[in-house]
Image (tube, helix red, strand yellow):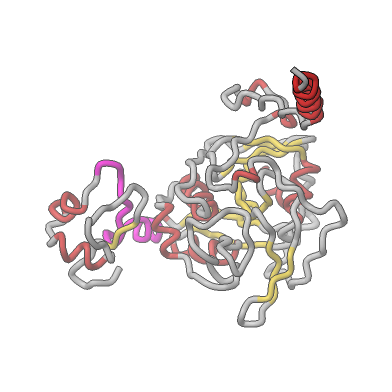
Amino acid sequence: MKRLPMICAMLSLLMLLAGCSPAMSTSPPDPTQDPATLTPDEMIITPSPFSPASSTMQPELPTETPLQPTATPAKPVVCDPNAPEPPTRATIEGVVGQPQAYSLSCEARSAADLAAYWDVAILEGVFFSQLPKADNPDEGFVGFISGAWGEIPPKSYGVHAQPVADLMVMYGLEAEAHKEMTFRCLQSEIAAGRPVIVWIVGHAWAGLPVPYVAPDGIETIVAPYEHTMILFGYDANNVHLIDAYTSKIETHSIASFLVSWTALDNMALTVIGADASVASQMAYTGDYYEVQYGDSLLGLANAWAVPWDSLAALNGIVHPFSIYPGQVLKSDVSTGVP
């Protein structure tokens, strides 16, 4: 019985300590709520499943003034000084997106969606396979397409505007990569009915420019959580974009967009129409195929009248000879090259 007061005292102490523990965070807003009922500042952005668990919210970045880009811009944009002032608002109808298939394929997805607006068919997986691979994002894709989002070179990262524009030209699109593009130029493109791919950070987050020197000694600017969206509209206060990850429309204030866009030196990709004859030749030559749900290696081999083992060898597929949706296969076994 002498121990009872001591036990009671210990229980009281434990209850007191429990009361000092950090309170559990409140439940997040319902992500299924219709975004149309929310204001831009209230819009809920569903975090990417490819992101680390700790990055389900906007990453905490330094609050001091970001580093200024030191790389020489590839092609500064100078708007026509005699062009009329862009209207206060403009929206392009008919821009439709699809969600990206891989954690780091936002650039290929945005390119495919922008090409579709110009009636040019591009498969996301095929487009990625045709991009050059490099250690410098200004020259090609850095890393693995299924790498972790949020890293910077030399880790898996992505690709900047120039290689994407160069490849889109191969599809017959009059594509051009830009750096140091002004918001007025961006408005002029939208007012002219031409959607623009923009390189921003996350979901219009404040970014941190990082100077990066590639192994070849060339310096460029990179940023954690580099991402692409298609800008298709603006008004006096906001911009409207299609997110490559979710394919959904996002609305952000012009101020927050500009801060995010500046991190990667106001990088953008513009397109003016397409050469239909070139596009039809590049869209699908029969040398590549993007695997769909329900496909099997044997079924595709039979459909193409080729030996299944030759098709497997051409694509480096080994036992148990499984293929998956979104995988890009070389199909021309007669030459062994795509």
The location of residue 252, given as percent across then percent down, is: 72, 37
Classify residue 21 by image quadrant.
top right
Residue that protrudes farthest toward the bottom in the picture: 216
Q: Horizontal placement of 128 versus 161: left or right?
A: left
Q: Split into 4 quadrants, where in the image is the C terminus?
A: bottom left
Q: Is residue 178 left or right of residue 19?
A: left
Magenta stretch? 277-294
Q: Is residue 187 left or right of residue 13?
A: left
| Camera-nearest residue between 226 and 261 | 226
Q: Is residue 282 left or right of residue 117?
A: left
- 14 or 105, which lies in front? 14
Nearer to me, 307 or 234:
307
Give above or below for 283 relative to 133: above
Check if residue 178 falls in the magenta segment. no
Which quarter of the rendering shows the N terminus? top right
Q: Position of residue 171 (x, y in %)?
A: 44, 60
The structure residue drawn at horizontal position 32% and vertical position 49%, both measured from the top left corner, is: 324
Q: Residue at x 53, y 43 (%)?
A: 49
Q: Position of residue 22 (x, y in %)?
A: 77, 32
Identified at 78% across, 66% down, the residue is 69
Which quadrant of the figure has residue 151?
Answer: bottom right
Number of marks in picture: 0
User: Is residue 274 visible in this depiction of the protein?
Assistant: yes
**Residue at x-position 76% and y-position 57%:** 208
Residue lying furthest front = 2
Q: Where 74 sits versus 149, above or below?
A: below
